[in-house]
Amino acid sequence: MIWACIIGAGIGCYLLKLAGMSIPARVLERPLVERIADLIPVALLAALIAVQVFASGSHLTIDARAAGLGVAVIALLLRAPFLVVVFAAALTAALLRVVFPGW
Amino acid sequence: MTPAERRAIVRDGLGVGLATGLYGVSFGAVSVAAGLSVLQTCVLSLVMFTGASQFAFVGVIAAGGAPVSGAVTALLLGTRNTLYGLKLAPLLQFHGWRRPAAAQVVIDESTAMAITRDSTAAARTGFVSTGVAVFCLWNLFTFVGAIAGNLIGDPRTYGLDAAVGAAFLALLWPRLADRRNRVIAACAAGIALVSVPLTSAGVPVLVAGGVALLAGVLTPTAVDETEIP
């Protein structure tokens, strides 16, 4: 099952790329399609952040991950590069767990 | 394009490739922490090869979601590459076998490094140098990260679970300059959180995707109709 999904989604993602390179632009270049296509990554990424940081199984929680996200926001406001943002968030969560085990 | 311009474009492409490729270490580590094998992790990077979709897929698996939910989320995130392809095709003018080969490296970074050029030759140089550099290094560092991830034990000790949220935020950040996007992001995050106790893992993110569809249909005035594509 997991393999089928890895291969299926992988090939699907490739076909999405190939479609863009092959389909005549006028087929997809409509205001509604463009608007939705612009909004989908915004909505999905925001939802992924929320779930990755505040969900634990089927309940919501605030733990070291939330502190990591807070530090990531500060790093982004300071225009830190991608790797610094990610590393700072991980380091924050890791250090907090040293002080408060199990958090 | 002079040889000097060409060298400058290739140098920029390699730089972007190195920075993005290094981030493959975190994907590899997060993926094996989610329970995927090293081989599965490497196949994801080779075949899927689009970072946000890959992180979303393993993120859903890590949360205990069905692989199908992860696959659907990955595909939805992959739709933006279709838009990139539409913008790139007339610029790059690839035909024959080059087009399916080039399609695999249509990603955020290669698009950004091609779309600003004023000639087909320069756009191709930017696209190919960035795309090939990211592809090679992303896959190499995915492998390194997956092996390392297997050796280090509980990823929570290193805050790797917090790194995923930060990575998604960094991908989202440039899009938040737009006010409407901020509203959509807040709504999507809120709806996803409300869905967490009510649905199985992976579904909240898909529900939030519905927010984007709905908002796109309901906000016709937000688009500048005078804009010429």
Image (cartoon, coloured by chain):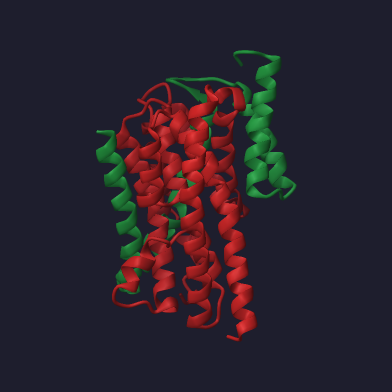
Tell me the quarter of the picture where residue A29 sits: bottom left
User: Where in the figure is residue B136, as x and y percent of width and height?
Assistant: 47, 56
Chain rendered green: A
User: Where in the figure is residue B215, as x and y percent of width and height?
Assistant: 43, 49
Q: Residue furthest top?
A: A101
B90 over B59 or under it: above or below: below
Q: In this view, does A80 lie to the left or right of B215?
A: right
Tell me the quarter of the picture where residue B204 sits: top left
Please give the name of the residue rendered at 58% of the width and 85% of the height, measured from the top-left corner.
B1
- Numbered disc total: 0
User: Where in the figure is residue B162, as x and y percent of width and height?
Assistant: 58, 31
Quadrant in the picture for the N terminus of chain A: top left
User: Where in the figure is residue A88, as x and y percent of width and height?
Assistant: 68, 36
Q: In this view, does A26 lie to the left or right of B18?
A: left
Please give the name of the residue rendered at 53% of the width and 22% of the height, measured from the top-left corner.
B154
Please give the name of the residue rendered at 49% of the width and 51% of the height, measured from the top-left corner.
B138
Chain rendered red: B
Please give the name of the residue rendered at 63% of the width and 32% of the height, measured from the top-left corner.
A90
Q: In this view, does B164 lie to the left or right of B93?
A: right
Q: Residue furthest right?
A: A78
Quadrant in the picture for the C terminus of chain A: top right
Q: Nearer the viewer, residue B163 or B21?
A: B21
Q: Tell me if I can see residue A30 in this picture.
A: no
Q: Tell me if I can see residue B105 in this picture.
A: yes
Q: Nearer the viewer, residue B183 or B135?
A: B135
